[in-house]
Image (tube, rainbow, N blue to C red):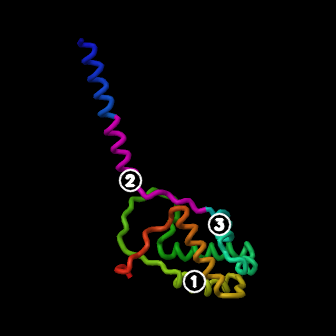
Amino acid sequence: MTTGVFIAAAAVCVFAIAAIVIGREARRLDAVAPRAVYNLDQASDFVADRLPGVTQARLTPEELQAMLSLHLRWLHARGLQPDRAVDKRQDIAELLLISEDQLSAYLLSEAEKSGVELLDDIDVVHVVRAHLAYFDAIGAVGPTASSTDL
C-alpha cells in the first residue's frame, strides 16, 4: 500500500515539474520574435518568379539582386534590419509605416547611382511588391497598418 502511495506521489511530482518547465519555456519563447532568415539567392528566385514576363525580360539577375540589396540598405537605414542575428523581445516602441511608394521612389533614385538601368519605372513597382511578398513568406513582415494608424 505504501509503495503505491509513493509511486503516485512520484508521478504527481514528475508531472508538476514537467508542467512548470514547459510552461516557463513556452512563455519565454512566446515573448521572443521568431527569427526570419533572409537569403539573397532565395529572395532573387522568389521575386523573379513573381515578376511579369516583360519585367523579367528587362531586368538581368544581377540588376534584380542589386535592387534587392538596395532595398535591404533602405530597411537597415530605418532600423528594420539588425546588424547581427539576435533573439529580441517583441517590444515595438514606435510605429513605423513603410509604403510601397516610399520604397519605389528610393529604388528609382538609387538604381541609377548603382548602375541599374531601368527601361520602365513600373519594373521597380513590380520588384517592390514581389520583394515584400518574400518578406511576408519568410515571416519578416509585421502587421498591416489599419486606417487609424495612417
Instruction: Report x, y in % for residue 112.
Output: 67, 86
Mark 2–mark 3 contact, CB under 8 Å?
A: no
Q: Which residue is mark 1?
A: 104
Label 1 secondary element: helix
Element carrying mark 2: helix
* Image position of 91 (left or right of 110): left
Relative to 96, is 14 on the left or the right? Answer: left
Circle 2 residues within 10 Å: few <14, some 14–19, many ≥20: few
Q: Which residues are magenta?
A: 18-38
Q: Of circles 1 and 3, which is in front?
A: 3
Q: Vertically, is 91 above or below 55? A: above
Query: Main structural element of the magenta stretch: helix, strand or loop?
Result: helix
Residue named by callout 3? 46
| Mark 2 or 3, closer to the camera | 3
Q: Residue furthest front?
A: 53
Pointer 2 residue = 30
Magenta highlight on residue 85: no
CA–CA distance between discs 1 and 3? Answer: 19 Å
Answer with mark 1 or mark 3, whichever residue precedes in sequence.
Answer: 3
For marks 2 and 1 on the same chain, the one whose residue lies earlier in the sequence: 2
The amino acid marked with disc number 1 is Ser
Outermost residue toward the top? 1
